Amino acid sequence: MKRILLLTILLLALAAIAFFYLRSDQGSTIEPYERDFGVKDTGAITKIFIADKGDRSVLLERQSKDEWTVNGGPMARPENINSLLVTLKRMRANYPVPRAAMNTVIRDLAAKSKKIELYTYDPDQPVKTFYMGSTVVNGNGNYMLMDGADQPYAVDIPGFDGYLTTRFGLDPEEWRSRAVFLYPPDKIEQIQIEYPEVPDASFSFQFKDGTYSIFKSANPSIEDKGMQVEASKGLNYTQAFRKLYSSGFANDFSRKDSVYQSKPAALIKVREKNGEENLLRLHYMPINKRSKSQFKPNGEKLNYDVDYYFAFMNESQDMMLIQDYVFGKVLLSYDDFIESAKPKRRGSVLQHRTMTN
């Protein structure tokens, strides 16, 4: 009887050893926090800090439910923030790094990982800190290590094929909102479009007392009563200002200061009914090797890009890239609103001038 009892105890001990050995290979004997990379309640996150081993870093801070700022300044792109929050919510530790690859992964994490800090209610103390390394061997997910842990994991998003690195970008420009004008039509009182080099095309567009009017000047006199614009055409034009975005930023352009001080190709000023105004200055972009069109219809070499412009909002020296394809619908001329006029140009006023002058 005693022999059977001892044998039973021995078998249980062996079973326990085998159980814990197998579980340790799967990382289950590691403290739970060491594999807890995901965040269930991303709505509680108030701040996200991302940094590399060099001097690059990005600080994202929540200002309201759907608004975040980048490095304490400009607003962040909503789609990028949403992508990051979804990633934090869905990513999970798939498996612990195998022993054979452990040294390589640890060296990689020590040399070139990204550090991610997540904050909730305490602005000075992160609730979670982890390091993101290279892409896993099969290309799905990245190797990650929780701060203070010894065991790195392959972390991925179930059902998603690809790595997570780009979701945690370090370029502040990529995080910044590209919104230029986001005006509901009923908020707009006046739109002024001025072309310093094509004054006859300049105009002022107003909505007052339920009527749309067009004036043959960006700054009409008080006596100028303007011409009434068909309601559907007026609404269609103001609708164009509902969502206008830049294509990005060009603050690293070597001649940015010269562009800023140069004469603008066009000025777009929008005044809201509450009196607030925003002014966008567009400048021609010199032709470059990336310009799709290099020649005019007559075969002459173009001096300026016909698809993109540089732009500045108000007094800011942030230089944006504006695409004619996007803004062409608002870069119209006075004649475009007059039924009797038959404009012969193709494209926006600026594009037409670049192609023909």
Image: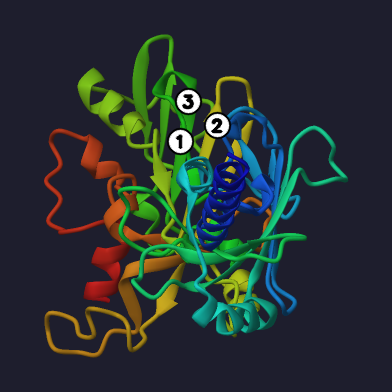
* Residue that carries the numbered disc 1 in the rendered image: 191
Proximity of marks 1 and 2: CB atoms separated by less than 8 Å? yes
Q: Residues within 10 Å of mark 1 (few under 14, many from 20)?
A: many
Residue at 59 percent across and 83 percent down: it is: 255
Does label 1 or label 2 sit earlier along the sequence?
1
Quarter holding residue 153: bottom right
Q: Residues within 10 Å of mark 3 (few under 14, many from 20)?
A: many
User: Is residue 94 positioned above or below 334 on the image?
Assistant: below
Quarter holding residue 355: bottom left
Instruction: Identify which amino acid the numbered label 2 is placed on.
Output: Arg
Proximity of marks 3 and 1: CB atoms separated by less than 8 Å? yes
- Asked whether 241 or 249 is in front, the reply is 249
Measured as percent of width and height from the top left, residue 226 is found at 37, 27
Instruction: Identify which amino acid the numbered label 3 is placed on.
Output: Ile
Does label 2 or label 3 sit earlier along the sequence?
3
Measured as percent of width and height from the top left, residue 141 is found at 43, 62
- Asked whether 102 or 60 is in front, the reply is 102
Q: Closer to us: mark 3 or mark 1? A: 3
* Residue that carries the numbered disc 2 in the rendered image: 271
Instruction: Identify which amino acid the numbered label 1 is placed on.
Output: Ile
* Residue that carries the numbered disc 3 in the rendered image: 188
Proximity of marks 2 and 3: CB atoms separated by less than 8 Å? yes
Q: In the shown orientation, is residue 97 left or right of residue 172? A: left
